[in-house]
Image (cartoon, rainbow, N blue to C red):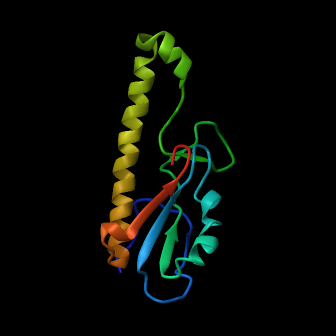
Amino acid sequence: MASITALNGPSHGPANGRSVASAVILLHGYGASGDALIGLAPYFAQSLPQTVFYSPNAPQAWEGGGFGGRQWFGLQGYDPEGMRRDPNRFAAVYQAMFEGAVAAADVLNRYIDEVMAAHSLAADRVALLGFSQG
């Protein structure tokens, strides 16, 4: 079995202890961590007993500080109303956010590939579930 190293975080399952037929990757929101969503796995596993659940921690420490929070990319300077009023003033902020999202996507794609390889799963056997920034 291949190892999963692109990101870390809690996992669960499969509930029936048999081979993995599918995977669900739970993506937490801004300032949270993988621990925030893994508690959903036992409930989903009742209907998906051959599914393994992963809830990785985002690659960056949360810029809001403390409590072990993580972020997929920075939101410092985010101001949608300011962008509407003066897009030129906020262009650099939004460019930095875009570049951060692209970098996070690269890490997440590598993680998904590792999950698929670890369990010999095709892409159509993997689902992503998230909210907020996830």
Query: Seen from this angle, which residue lies furthest right?
Result: 67
Residue 114 is situated, as x and y percent measured from the top left of the image, at 35, 67
Query: Is the residue 83 above or below the residue 74 in the image?
Result: above
Query: Is the residue 117 above or below the residue 19 in the image?
Result: above
Query: Is the residue 97 above or below the residue 14 in the image?
Result: above
Query: Is the residue 13 above or below the residue 53 in the image?
Result: below
Q: Could you tell whether 80 is left or right of 5 in the image?
A: right
Residue 35 is situated, as x and y percent measured from the top left of the image, at 63, 60
Residue 5 is situated, as x and y percent measured from the top left of the image, at 41, 65
Q: Residue at x 40, y 18 (%)?
A: 91
- Quadrant position of residue 12: bottom right
What quarter of the picture does the N terminus occupy? bottom left
Q: Could you tell whether 27 is left or right of 19 in the image?
A: right
Q: Residue at x 53, y 15 (%)?
A: 82
Q: Residue at x 48, y 77 (%)?
A: 51
Query: Seen from this angle, which residue lies furthest front?
Result: 47
- Quadrant position of residue 36: bottom right
Residue 60 is situated, as x and y percent measured from the top left of the image, at 50, 46
Residue placed most toward the observer, 87 or 2: 87
Q: Could you tell whether 130 is left or right of 103 in the image?
A: right
Q: Residue at x 43, y 63 (%)?
A: 127
Q: Report how many numbered discs are placed on residues in the image.
A: 0
